[in-house]
Image (tube, rainbow, N blue to C red):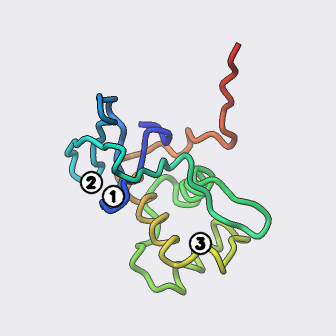
Amino acid sequence: MELKDIVAVNGKPGLYEIKAQSKGGIIVESLLDGKKFPVTVTHNLSALNEIAIYTYEEEVPLRIIFKTIGEKEGGKEAINPKESGKVLTSYFREILPNFDEERVYTSNIKKVLQWYNLLASKNFDFTAIQEVEEETEEA
C-alpha cells in the first residue's frame, strides 16, 4: 500500500485504497471494513498525496506530516483525535510548529490524526514516504 493509492471520498468515512480501473471510474476498498465499491465522476475524491497543510511560509504536503508523526510515534497510533481542541492544537504544533492557525482548523487536525491512526492501524510504512515527490521524466 502506497500513499499515492490512498484517497478520501467526500461524504464517506475513513480512507480508501484504489484497487482497479473500471469503465466508469475506479474501484476502491475501504480501509475501515474492507468493502469494495465503484467511485464515479459524481464522487469527490481527495488523494492523500495531493493534500497539503498551510504554514505561514508555504504549504507542507500531508505525506511529510505523516512521516513526522510516524517518526515521533515510532509508527504507532498518535493521540486520539477526539481530544480537546487545545490538546490537538498543542500536539499538532509539535509536529508542524509553524502551521497557520487561522487557516488550519481543529477539524483539519482531527481529520489528519484520524487518517494517520487509520493508516498506522493497518501497519502502513511511514518510513517509506519520500520527502520529495519523485519526478517522472518523459523522454
Of the two numbered discs 1 and 3 in the rendering, the one whose residue sits closer to the viewer: 1
Going 66% across and 80% down the picture, which residue do you hit?
Answer: 102
| Pick the front one: 28 or 39 | 39
Does dot 2 land on a helix, a strand or a loop? loop
The circle drawn on residue 96 is none
Residue 116: image location, x then y, percent: 46, 58
Q: Amino acid at mark 2?
A: Leu
Q: If the image is split into quadrants, where does the C terminus sit? A: top right
Counting residues from the start of the chain, the first of labels 3 and 2 encountered is 2
Q: The N terminus lies in which quarter of the figure?
A: top left
Label whose residue precedes the other's in the sequence (1 or 2):
1
- Identified by mark 3, the residue type is Phe
Q: How many other residues sit within 10 Å of disc 1, few (<14), some (14-19) or many (≥20)? A: some
Between the C-alphas of marks 3 and 2, the distance is 24 Å
Q: Residue at x 33, y 58 (%)?
A: 14
Q: Is there a contact, CB below 8 Å, between mark 1 and mark 2? A: yes
Which residue position holds label 1? 14
Q: Secondary structure at mark 3?
A: helix
Q: Which numbered circle lies on residue 92?
A: 3
Residue 2 horizontal side relative to residue 50, left or right: left
Q: Earlier in the sequence, mark 1 or mark 3?
A: 1
Q: Which residue is mark 2?
A: 32
Indicate the amino acid at tag 1.
Gly
Quarter of the rendering containing residue 29? top left
